[in-house]
Image: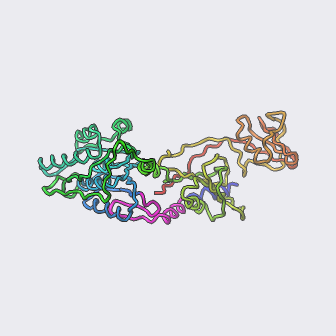
Amino acid sequence: MRKVLSSALHGIAALLAGVTMAVSALAAENAFGPFTFDDTKPDVISLNGEIDAGSALNFRRALQAAPNAKLVTLNSIGGNVQMALLIADDIHQRKLATYIPKDSRCFSSCSYIFLAGIERKADGQLGVHQISSDAPDLVGAQLAISDIIDLLNRFDTPVEVMSVMFKTPPNDMHIFTADEIERYKLNRTGTEQQPTTAAAPVLPSTAPGTGGAPTSTQITAPPSQTPPVTATASTPPTSQETQALVSPIEEFTKRPNRIAIYTGMDLFGDDISSTRVVDAAACALSCLLTKGECKAFTFNADPKIKRGPNCFLKSSAGRADGNSVAFSGRFLSAADADPSAITLGTIDPKSALFDNVDLPGGDLSHFPDRAAKTPLDCRLACIDEAQCVAFTYLKKKKECWLKGFIGTPIFGQDMVSGMKKLQTFSPAKIISLN
């Protein structure tokens, strides 16, 4: 048994490498400057990195390559103000949603892009400050601020947010707290967006760089490819239209973005299918290929099992159970917190079950457990009973006896006994799928 455990533990590195390679093979990434999307999620464009002088053009290239994009995820320290305003205008005109994932940040000029979203949510950090410029051009700076205010007004940005923005020095950063995000209504669903007019703003042209001072040239943002529709109080959006507005962020946050891997733990039950694969990485890939139907998997690493299924795909994480030859994985979405350690009473089917062994005495009841008809049922019944520390199952009589203490083991023909112990399970690794 120690050899099996050792082999399983050594297999973690191979499992991680295999899953990473499998995920990479599934997703062909398309990059346009700091903007990317992959073929498995063509409705999501991701901004990762600084906004530079070519970012507005690169964003339009990404939009052309991903015409069905509904959502832009943000992870940027900011950058060129003019480019950010042009990107923000495109997002607003196309009615795209914006989202800052957990552990991501959207600072400085990136905040304009976030605020442009028809639907928007900040699970990560949102930070703002004044624009900065190396050129002492007061008039140009005031014009730039005026253009920023005009654009932010089009996005129905609360005046308190703009006040915080312009009061924070350019060498500082105000990161909104969860309380401020709620108070200023920085998160919003698609149905909360006010009707917009068809007029496009006049945006300042700045030299490349972070917060550069505006030049004398003015650039007019291009008109939307889809003419805006003005809603009236008498024509509320239909349920289908409302769903179309609300769904992008909710859909994205429900998608799996990482896997929590456990060793020695079986996710028992809720199987949707089972198959035989070469290793745990292949089992994880089989789960991924179901496109959301599979939420977890367990791989049996026992080398003695030469035939039959060893990969079990599950509709949910089911119930956790101890099994020293098991690798299990649970898929997590952006909405899920990293799982914490759990402590369970377990009767390991590989190391804590004993054939032809009786544990006399210590019965919790004068009668056998009537619901337990098999050794498996008896094992689970003991696990579920807090006072049970062991069990003995009589195969011929099909009787399950739960024990309150462990007697001296003796030979028992056609009996199976098991002893319970407490085990703590923590993820051996959490693998990102991004």
Q: Is residue 317 visible?
A: yes
The image quadrant of residue 385 is: top right
Lateral position of residue 209 relative to residue 104, left or right? left
The spot of residue 140 in percent (x, y) is 13, 50
Q: Is residue 333 left or right of residue 168?
A: right
Q: How is the image coloured?
A: rainbow
x, y percent for residue 377: 76, 45
Could you tell me which residue is drawn at 64 percent across and 43 percent down? 423
Rendered residue at 66%/62% (across/down): 275
Residue 121 seen in render: no
Residue 33 part of the magenta-drawn span: yes
User: Is 222 in front, or is 181?
Assistant: 222
* Side of 256 relative to 234 (left or right): right
Q: To which quarter of the image does residue 358 belong?
A: top right
Q: Which of 136/353 is in front? A: 136
Q: Is residue 8 magenta?
A: no
Per the rendered image, the range of residues in magenta is 14-43
Q: Residue at x 59, y 63 (%)?
A: 282
Nearer-the-camera pick, 6 or 369? 369
User: Which residue is painted at 59% across and 42% down in the image?
Assistant: 342
Screen quadrant of the C terminus? bottom left
Q: Position of residue 241 (x, y in %)?
A: 42, 50
